[in-house]
């Protein structure tokens, strides 16, 4: 029987995707990459207004499956190709998805597993979860966008500490450092993550998607380019039905009914 490497549940306007190789702490193999990319494609194609990504069992993801034949064989594999074909497209896809991606880190997130989580837009983590830049333990370089996101999120000193020492960072410290949005009691994580995904999905999702784009672009733009981008995106947002509805609802002192367009 084929392993169901992910589970997908359609919710009310949003999609919940669960990495589903719990015996291996949801380590990534090629099948799981393929299934996850297809699920994200589907979410975009069907106009999902938010995505929630989490892991089955006691971990979020332990990164690359090191028992995968390609990696365990002892031969020198071309890991650049692995990044080109699997991890980099995944990170690009998450960042380009035109809706918020919430990540509920339910347990340990190590190696590429940690950095895929950090590629999501809002990261919640169970208080017992840990983030480990495990790469240094096996002679590798942080990948899946880690060397981009870590120094931007926590500064160079902490980024280097995390990447060079590969020590587990508890969820609460990750939140205090600004690496993630919030640490949450384990038993409340999924309820809170689902409530957040539902809240985002009921929001002005066209505007939220443009906001996501603007904030991501700020990592590489200077102030002039960023001001120009804000102008362009605000022009687009100002033409949306949700903007009209938001203003109308404010003036009528009622709750807005956003449609994501
Ligand atoms: C695993 C794994 C795993 C297979 C736990 N693979 N089975 C790399 C190469 C190519 C290109 C792209 O980029 C990358 C990026 C990377 O992600 S490199 C980093 C890969 N990940 C790691 O080095 C982390 C390895 N895992 C660990 O250090 C520990 O498992 C952590 C700290 C995550 C959790 O520790 P524990 O809670 O003590 O659990 P455990 O070690 O007992 O693991 C539970 C099971 O999961 C165990 O299997 P078993 O059959 O003995 O119960 C592990 O072998 C398996 N597992 N990670 N990456």
Image: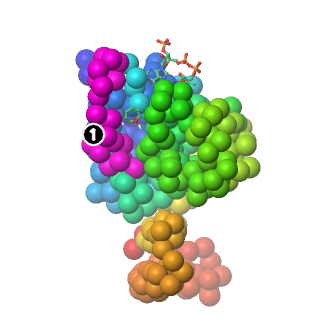
| In the displayed structure image, the side of residue 224 where residue 98 appears, left or right | left
The crowd level at tag 1 (other Cα within 10 Å; few <14, some 14-19, many 20+) is few
Asked if residue 39 lies in the magenta stretch, the reply is: no
Residue 105 % position (x, y): 57, 39
Decide which of 71, 204 is in the foreground and name it. Answer: 71
Magenta highlight: main SS: helix
The residue at which mark 1 appears reads as 81
Task: Name the quarter where the C terminus is drawn.
Answer: bottom left
* Residue 140 seen in render: yes
Task: Name the quarter where the N terminus is drawn.
Answer: top left
Residue 205 % position (x, y): 46, 67
Tell me which segment is drawn in magenta.
Answer: 69-91
Residue drawn 46% across and 56% down?
Answer: 50
Above/below status of 183 relative to 240? above
Decide which of 26, 65 is in the foreground and name it. Answer: 65
Above/below status of 222 relative to 189? below
């Amino acid at each position: 029987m084929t392993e169901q490497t992910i589970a997908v549940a359609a919710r009310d306007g949003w999609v919940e995707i669960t990495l589903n190789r719990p015996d291996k702490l949801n380590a990534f193999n090629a099948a799981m990459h393929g299934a996850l990319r297809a699920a994200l494609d589907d979410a975009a194609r069907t106009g999902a207004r938010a995505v929630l990504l989490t892991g089955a069992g006691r971990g979020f993801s332990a990164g690359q499956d090191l028992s995968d034949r390609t990696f365990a064989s002892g031969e020198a594999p071309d890991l650049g190709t692995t990044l080109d074909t699997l991890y980099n497209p995944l990170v690009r896809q998450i960042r380009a998805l035109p809706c918020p991606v919430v990540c509920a880190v339910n347990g340990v997130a190590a190696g590429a597993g940690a950095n895929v989580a950090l590629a999501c837009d809002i990261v919640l983590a169970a208080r017992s979860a840990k983030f480990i830049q495990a790469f240094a333990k096996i002679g590798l370089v942080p990948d899946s966008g880690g060397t981009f996101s870590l120094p931007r999120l926590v500064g160079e000193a902490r980024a280097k500490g995390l990447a060079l020492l590969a020590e587990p960072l508890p969820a609460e410290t990750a939140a205090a450092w600004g690496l993630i949005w919030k640490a949450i009691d384990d038993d409340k994580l999924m309820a809170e993550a689902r409530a957040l995904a539902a809240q985002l999905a009921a929001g002005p999702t066209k505007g939220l998607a443009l906001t996501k784009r603007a904030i991501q672009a700020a990592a590489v733009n200077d102030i002039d380019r960023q001001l120009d981008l804000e102008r362009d995106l605000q022009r687009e947002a100002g033409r949306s039905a949700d903007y009209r509805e938001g203003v109308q609802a404010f003036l009528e002192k009622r709750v807005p009914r956003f449609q994501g367009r």
